[in-house]
Image (cartoon, rainbow, N blue to C red):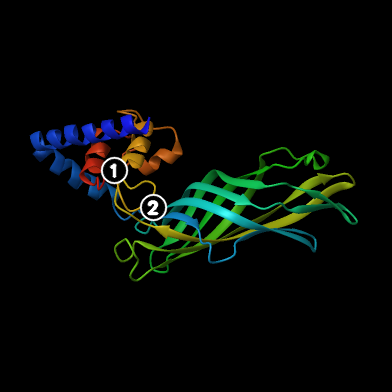
Amino acid sequence: MRIHGMMCFRQTILRCTFSLAVIGAMCVTLTSASNEARGDAFFPIARENVALKSDFTLDFGGVVTTGNITSTDMVLKLNPEQNSARVIQYFQKVEPLQIPIGPGIFLDTGDITVTVMHSIGGTFDGDTNAYGTEDIYAVYFEGDLSALGIESPFVLPSSSDGSLTFDAKPAGGAAGSTGQIDLEWNGSSKLEGPAGPIEFSYVCRVHTVFSITTAGDIDGDFDVDEDDFEFMQACYSGNLSYSDPHCELADLVRDKKINFADMVVFFENVTSGE
């Protein structure tokens, strides 16, 4: 229950505060090490920009079908020092598309869910704030597309290009902590239609708003609280490396493990127990 969880969270804060007082010198060392380990890497947490239209388009040799994107949740890892970029998390909802299977004949995809199955990674330019990655997307259709031999997930290898625009004076955060990400990923593939292969290209144009917040603010809501703590607990791996790639968000000292060192950084940044 949430009440029990809140009590445990507050008790943990007290225990950690006491521990920090007892081993203050150790905590200073760990914190300095964690700041150095983080380097210039940062994690924009992005959500759909409802003020702009985002869409997913399929082009079957001139027959074009487009679905509106209703929601996007995305987390990137960008490192200007290493000129690297990678998609940590991607979850998207798209309205149904109409796929042509013959003259005037279409199949309805039903609602569509898109996730990243694997991010190969790519480059990030810290001067222009532009990035590019190679990713493999998994597309899930609610409609019956068995006539095309499609089973969910349908895999789409894609190239992505995006850019960040930082807000000068964001509300609720420091300068340079929020902004907008404009992203486009695209590629080509084919379906096995009744009359033979159907080749098509695809492009997804996405507009999101993002925040870059304090270490430990995993959900990007500008505070470090119980919700973030639950994520830290779920990813805790001790001296072993974590296996879930999403847990990289909880690796606050960037050592491929979620353990005491990460908890020290987390509790130093706690802003609310409410």
Viewport quadrant of the N terminus: top left
Residue 240 in which image quadrant: top left
At 76% from the left and 49% from the top, the residue drawn is 190
Q: Are marks 1 and 2 in contact (CB under 8 Å)?
A: no
Secondary structure state at the residue bearing disc 2: loop
Quadrant location, the C terminus: top left
Count of numbered circles on the image: 2
Residue at label 1?
Answer: 274
Task: Give the crowd class for mark 1: few <14, some 14-19, many >=20 residues within 10 Å.
Answer: few
Q: Where 2 sits versus 113, above or below?
A: above
Q: Position of residue 125 (x, y in %)?
A: 42, 63
Residue highlighted by disc 2? 43
Q: Which mark is residue 248?
A: none
**Would residue 49 appear left or right of 34 to someone viewing this image?**
right
Point 18% across, 41% down: residue:
30
How far across and down, in percent of the image, does residue 96 sit?
Answer: 71, 51
